[in-house]
Image: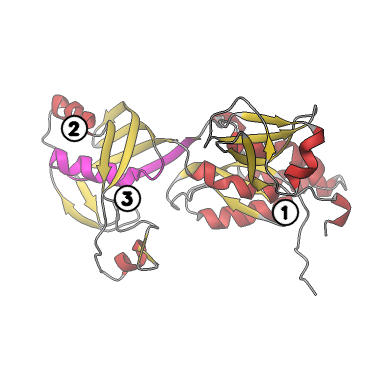
Amino acid sequence: MARRSKGRFIDGIVLLDKATGMSSNFALQRVKRFFNANKAGHTGALDPLATGMLPVCLGEATKFSQHLLDSDKRYLVTAKLGQRTDTSDSDGEVVQTRPLEFTEAQLMSALEHFRGDTLQVPSMYSALKYQGQPLYKYAREGIEVPREARPITVFELNFIGLEGDELTLDIHCSKGTYIRTIIDDLGEMLGCGAHVIMLRRTQVAHYPYDKMVTLEQLEALVAKAQEEQLDPSSLLDSLLLPMDTAVADFPEVNVPDASATYLMQGQAVRVSGLVADTLVRITLGTERRFVGIGEMNEDGLLAPKRLVVIHDPAKAS
């Protein structure tokens, strides 16, 4: 007999404002429990040191989390200059201390080096894998393994301020960019060393900063619901963003009701007006109900790639 999943069928995205000192997985599990969701996943881990935007996908929204993993991000970072650590952040051990001897002109010139398209060698303290194991596991054992430089793009790198030995920057970058590595490389370029002491993710894709909620806010809503003898979902579910916001940048293809049954059975259907090899967001009928993503082929056919399952709420456990 198939094992029944625990939790209710609830689909959407929560913009969590993760606090410092907790892992992204811990935060994810708390959100999942508050919403009593049967399935949840996050869209790119933040280090325990880091705070800020962590989109948590619930239910069928998890099918589109990869598109948020691949999206651009924006960070506010403060670096301590003059000290280099083994992890490139304040959670690590100081391995070198040097004086600050650069000029303002040298700092601005160094910052320019990181703008645009560059190659970055990932930190040993990252979750990238080498021979099946995350790099940070090797690092904790004192083992250095080869890492290939990867192409990244820094769309914006804005100087916010320098107070004493603390430098604050605003960085808008492509997926796979390690802010700790930028700070470590900058410190070496300036000849003084540097490490991250504050990191806050302020944006993922197009999601608005003011829609974030903290675990404390979610906990307070659950407590309020219990006091008023309400189902917590009556207060929590209004915080969910639609799951198709994860693919909002994809062009929409609206499939008429006459073709909907074929599409939802996984068959390609004919549509017009889009270029082949284009990923699209699929909606059905006059209600424009989002049902997944697909790809246009050279024959003008829309082939479904990831379709959502429409659940009967009465079957939720």
* N-terminal-most mark, 3 or 2: 3
Name the spot of residue 53 as percent of width and height, x first. Answer: 52, 40
Q: Residue at x 62, y 57 (%)?
A: 29
Frontmost residue, 239 versus 220 = 239
Give the alpha-carbon distance from disc 1 to disc 2, as whole Å: 47 Å
* N-terminal-most mark, 3 or 1: 1
Residue 88 sits above or below residue 272 on the image: below
Residue 27 placement, left or right of 316 = left
Frontmost residue, 165 versus 175 = 175
Give the alpha-carbon distance from disc 3 to disc 1, as whole Å: 34 Å
Residue at the bottom extreme, as displayed? 1
Q: What residue type is disc 2 on?
A: Ala
Give the alpha-carbon distance from disc 3 to disc 2, as whole Å: 20 Å
Q: Quadrant of the C terminus?
A: bottom right
Q: What residue type is disc 1 on?
A: Ala
Disc 2 target residue: 110
Residue 191 placement, left or right of 20 = left
* N-terminal-most mark, 1 or 2: 1
- The answer to whether marks 1 and 2 mark residues whose Cβ atoms lie closer than 8 Å is no
Disc 3 target residue: 89
Residue 212 visible in the current orientation: no
Frontmost residue, 144 versus 96 = 144
Residue 146 visible in the current orientation: yes
Q: Residue at x 63, y 37 (%)?
A: 301
- Disc sitting over residue 37 in the figure: 1
Q: Quadrant of the N terminus?
A: bottom right
Q: What residue type is disc 3 on?
A: Asp
Does the magenta segment cover residue 176? Answer: yes
Count of labels shown? 3
